[in-house]
């Protein structure tokens, strides 16, 4: 499809009506930018004066299910939920989407020289993750109460449980390089990884699943982050919320920050989750107790470190993480109090 044909006058009218009432469209322009993205500028007449509205367009065949789930499904069942943790989708076509423009609102990705996020950034994102995860749990609890039977998001949507696609060649190569002995050891390790990511020991929910810095946008005041929004969710990823927490920390922080703040960040997330769940009159210990949090960290850490290795480019850091993953695989994970039959 040519750029000029991406958006019709009717499409533009639908978008503007969701943003302003009784606005008259004068004209609009679709301006291409890198990576199949577009800036859409719409000149309108509203309340006796001319205005310029700006939206963000993206060419993709992947419909953002999470956006629809948060803005449509969740708001109907738990109206107190605020879905603004991710940008609002105004229009979806076959291969073109229009969102609210986060750049215009002052949100940007964090481009630090180190490539890492600092402690303030991580704490802000953990709070947003707690809002997201708590809403997912509250949605399940509300639907269970309404239907008088156990309801999970897994039963509503086609979901994926895998942290890592274990049969991919690069994954097999990394795991093979971690081991230096027999084929039997390799098979046992692959089986262990598969069992870890499909285990029902821990309560699952919808997760982001792609928590690299390019998928997190911050609004800052004098360099200090005040808000953040999550973009580019992995489609219908259903896992322990701890996987999101570990991804965020291990994908975006330095070893020094993790050494000094890892435990405090876990506790910060748990406090935020407790506070957010209280808004839905739900006890955090029924969802993710401190004991379950610690057990889940040990359980999923090898998978997250394996994911981290696959993201790394510098061989020296890969070797270090491989050694950590190897050690983590040898540890027996603590038991969980989560009972999936409840």
Image (spheres, rainbow, N blue to C red):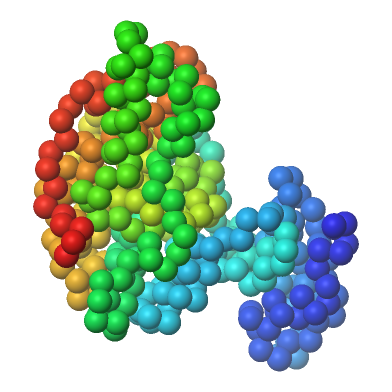
Q: What x and y, as percent, mark residue 13?
A: 76, 81
Q: Nearer the viewer, residue 286 or 168?
A: 168
The C terminus, quarter of image: bottom left
**295 left or right of 219?**
left
Quadrant hosting residue 97: bottom right
Q: Is residue 209 above or below residue 4?
A: above
Q: Residue at x 30, y 55 (%)?
A: 204
Q: Is residue 124 visible?
A: no
Quadrant hosting residue 91: bottom right
Q: How many discs appear?
A: 0
Q: Is residue 323 above or below residue 333?
A: above
The N terminus, quarter of image: bottom right
Q: Residue at x 39, y 48 (%)?
A: 161
**288 left or right of 105?**
left
Q: What x and y, as percent, mark residue 17?
A: 68, 83
Q: What x and y, as percent, mark residue 321?
A: 35, 22
Q: Is residue 220 above or below residue 277?
A: above
Q: What x and y, as percent, mark residue 146?
A: 29, 83
């Amino acid at each position: 499809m040519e750029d000029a044909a991406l958006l019709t006058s009717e499409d533009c009218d639908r978008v503007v009506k969701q943003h302003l009432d009784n606005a008259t469209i004068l004209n609009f322009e679709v301006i291409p930018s890198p990576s199949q993205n577009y800036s859409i500028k719409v000149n309108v007449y509203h309340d006796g004066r001319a205005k310029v509205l700006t939206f963000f367009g993206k060419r993709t065949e992947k419909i953002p299910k999470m956006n629809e789930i948060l803005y449509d499904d969740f708001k109907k069942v738990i109206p107190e939920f605020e879905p603004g943790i991710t940008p609002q989708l105004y229009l979806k076509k076959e291969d073109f989407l229009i969102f609210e423009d986060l750049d215009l609102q002052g949100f940007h990705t964090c481009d630090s020289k180190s490539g890492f996020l600092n402690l303030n950034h991580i704490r802000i994102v953990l709070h947003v993750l707690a809002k997201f995860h708590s809403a997912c749990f509250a949605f399940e609890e509300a639907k269970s109460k309404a239907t008088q039977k156990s309801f999970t998001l897994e039963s509503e949507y086609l979901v994926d449980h895998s942290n890592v696609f274990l049969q991919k060649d690069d994954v097999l190569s990394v795991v093979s390089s971690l081991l230096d002995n027999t084929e039997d050891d390799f098979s046992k390790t692959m089986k262990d990884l598969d069992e870890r990511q499909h285990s029902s020991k821990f309560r699952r929910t919808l997760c982001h699943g792609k928590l690299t810095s390019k998928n997190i946008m911050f609004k800052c005041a004098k360099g200090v982050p005040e808000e953040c929004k999550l973009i580019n969710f992995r489609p219908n990823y259903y896992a322990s919320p701890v996987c999101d927490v570990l991804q965020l920390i291990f994908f975006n922080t330095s070893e020094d920050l993790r050494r000094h703040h890892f435990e405090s960040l876990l506790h910060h997330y748990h406090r935020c989750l407790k506070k957010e769940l209280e808004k839905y009159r739900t006890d955090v210990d029924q969802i993710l107790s401190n004991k379950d949090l610690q057990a889940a960290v040990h359980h999923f850490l090898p998978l997250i470190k394996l994911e981290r290795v696959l993201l790394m480019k510098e061989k020296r850091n890969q070797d270090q993480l491989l050694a950590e993953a190897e050690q983590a695989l040898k540890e027996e994970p603590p038991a969980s109090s989560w009972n999936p039959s409840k």
